[in-house]
């Protein structure tokens, strides 16, 4: 049975382009937004349009949609894999899907929209380069859309796409799109996100997803897929600060001393002077080994063994850094927390701070404030409840080497674990040492005017001032 508006042939995904180093250009994406805004349907549409769905998969979805009384295939079924998700028509778990075009490969985390599963959204967005925030054109930017955009900005995602979905349900009206776009861009401006795009789409019909829509001639911007293919994310990563969390200290015999782990950021070569943190002891990299072979350099993402020239004390949880490029080391940390536990934050409870390969007991010394996700205003708070976002001061039992999250996500991210239940209760982003950030604000709370949509995006529409 052929699906309406969807090719039913066996699809083979096109091979993604490779960069000059021979590696695939991968863009990690997270979807976000309020419940029922169409995140799973949009991802299903992208999978179909990029020929990443086999005919039997599409036929199964088409048949399941027919049994439910749908005239069109419900593309959300391509990603909503849990039985509870299909029964309730919502996303609960984080679904990862991969697809590719000749220009780029993509890995998408389809995250839940329901406020109950915000913690799952945090998990899915933690490694993303770009966030697509779905907005229902009929309802505009709602609280959960704002919460997800705010969390994305806290997680250091520098590229936001507001996909104004269900344009077919507002008659593809330019004024309806412009109202939503003004609200979305104004909110994003207060978050300080450097790259924001607003694109009108209909995930159900495919308008402006991969092909330009004849129903919206007033829109002069790129399609969603074109934007995803061309957004530049290479400059977002930290290539300067060498950070090597130690997973294992190696001493097979008296002639060799080394450490094993994965390079979190930056690069290192043999002969460079390094320091072991938090102790501060110094040594030199004697050699770099990858898969048993001596290599010239280790870069971010490489799992390697670093042979050390000197007899220095080193253990799991330590961090190897360049001697003249060290992160902060301390026991007082300022951070933003996304609280993910049903039980509210309790300063009297014992927590464990896990960062890279290091784990240390910690306590919440103070809750500085909670953020109202609608207004971005700071409100006084003594604790944080489920899905709250707030700024806290942490005290750790032992010194921790860390960077500010905005400078290096690899060493600026951590989780808090309840020491009694072993449940992960919060995701945290380091802002710096307590003395460094006193009086500083991460959220701009000044009143600003909504940013107008570019005339290159909305043109020739009734009522649009040129």
Image (cartoon, helix red, strand yellow):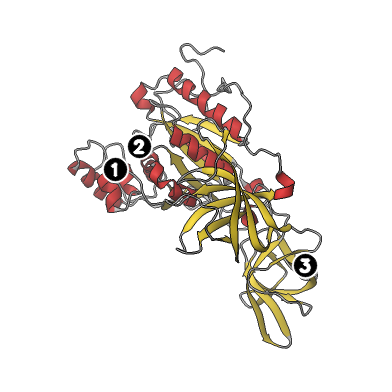
Indicate which disc residue 280 carries: 3
Q: Which residue lies at the image location 30% right of the left edge and 36% below the top edge?
A: 5
Is disc 2 in contact with disc 1, using a CB cutoff of under 8 Å? yes
| Mark in front: 2 vs 3 | 3
Question: According to the image, label 1 marks what residue?
Answer: 89
Indicate which disc residue 40 carries: none
Question: According to the image, label 2 marks what residue?
Answer: 36
> Where is 133 relative to 431, above or below?
above
Earlier along the polypeptide chain: callout 2 or callout 1?
A: 2
Q: Which residue lies at the image location 34% right of the left edge and 35% below the top edge?
A: 204
> Where is 184 relative to 98, above or below?
above
Give how far across and how far down residue 279 sits, in percent: 75, 68
Quadrant in the picture for residue 33: top left
**Residue furthest toward the front?**
348
Give how far across and how far down residue 407 sits, in percent: 68, 49
Q: Is residue 227 visible?
A: no
Give how far across and how far down residue 399 sits, in percent: 69, 63
């Amino acid at each position: 049975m052929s699906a309406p508006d969807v090719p039913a042939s066996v699809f083979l995904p096109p091979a993604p382009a490779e960069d000059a180093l021979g590696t695939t250009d991968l863009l990690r994406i997270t979807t976000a937004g309020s419940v029922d805004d169409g995140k799973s349907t949009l991802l299903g549409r992208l999978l179909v349009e990029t020929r990443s769905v086999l005919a039997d998969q599409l036929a199964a979805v088409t048949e399941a949609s027919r049994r439910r009384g749908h005239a069109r295939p419900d593309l959300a079924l391509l990603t909503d894999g849990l039985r509870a998700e299909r029964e309730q028509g919502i996303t609960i778990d984080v679904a990862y899907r991969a697809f590719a075009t000749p220009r780029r490969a993509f890995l998408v985390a389809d995250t839940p929209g329901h406020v109950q599963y915000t913690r799952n959204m945090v998990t899915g967005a933690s490694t993303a380069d770009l966030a697509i925030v779905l907005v229902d054109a009929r309802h505009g930017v709602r609280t959960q859309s704002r919460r997800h955009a705010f969390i994305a900005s806290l997680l250091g995602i520098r590229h936001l796409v507001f996909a104004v979905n269900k344009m077919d349900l507002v008659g593809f009206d330019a004024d309806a799109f412009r109202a939503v776009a003004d609200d979305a861009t104004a909110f994003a401006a207060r978050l300080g996100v450097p790259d924001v795009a607003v694109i009108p789409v209909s995930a159900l019909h495919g308008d402006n997803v991969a092909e330009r829509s004849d129903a919206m001639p007033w829109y002069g911007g790129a399609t969603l897929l074109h934007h995803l293919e061309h957004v530049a994310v290479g400059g977002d990563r930290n290539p300067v600060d060498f950070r090597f969390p130690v997973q294992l200290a190696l001493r097979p015999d008296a002639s060799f001393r080394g450490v094993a782990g994965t390079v979190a950021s930056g690069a290192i070569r043999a002969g460079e002077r390094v320091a072991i943190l938090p102790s501060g002891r110094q040594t030199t990299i004697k050699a770099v080994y990858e898969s048993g072979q001596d290599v010239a350099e280790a870069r971010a993402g490489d799992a390697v063994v670093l042979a050390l020239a000197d007899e220095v004390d080193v253990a799991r949880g330590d961090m190897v850094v360049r001697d003249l490029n060290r992160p902060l080391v301390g026991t007082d940390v300022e951070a933003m927390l996304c609280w993910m536990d049903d039980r509210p934050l309790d300063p009297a409870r014992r927590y464990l701070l896990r960062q890279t390969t290091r784990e240390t007991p910690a306590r919440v010394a103070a809750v500085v404030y909670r953020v109202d996700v609608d207004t971005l205003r700071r409100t006084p708070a003594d604790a944080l409840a489920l899905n709250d976002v707030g700024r806290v001061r942490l005290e750790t039992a032992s010194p921790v080497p860390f960077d500010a999250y905005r400078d290096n996500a690899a060493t600026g991210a951590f989780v808090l674990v309840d020491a009694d239940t072993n449940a992960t209760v919060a995701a945290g982003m380091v802002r710096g040492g307590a003395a460094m950030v006193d009086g500083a604000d991460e959220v701009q709370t000044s009143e600003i005017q909504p940013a107008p949509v570019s005339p290159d995006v909305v043109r020739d529409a009734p009522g649009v001032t040129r």
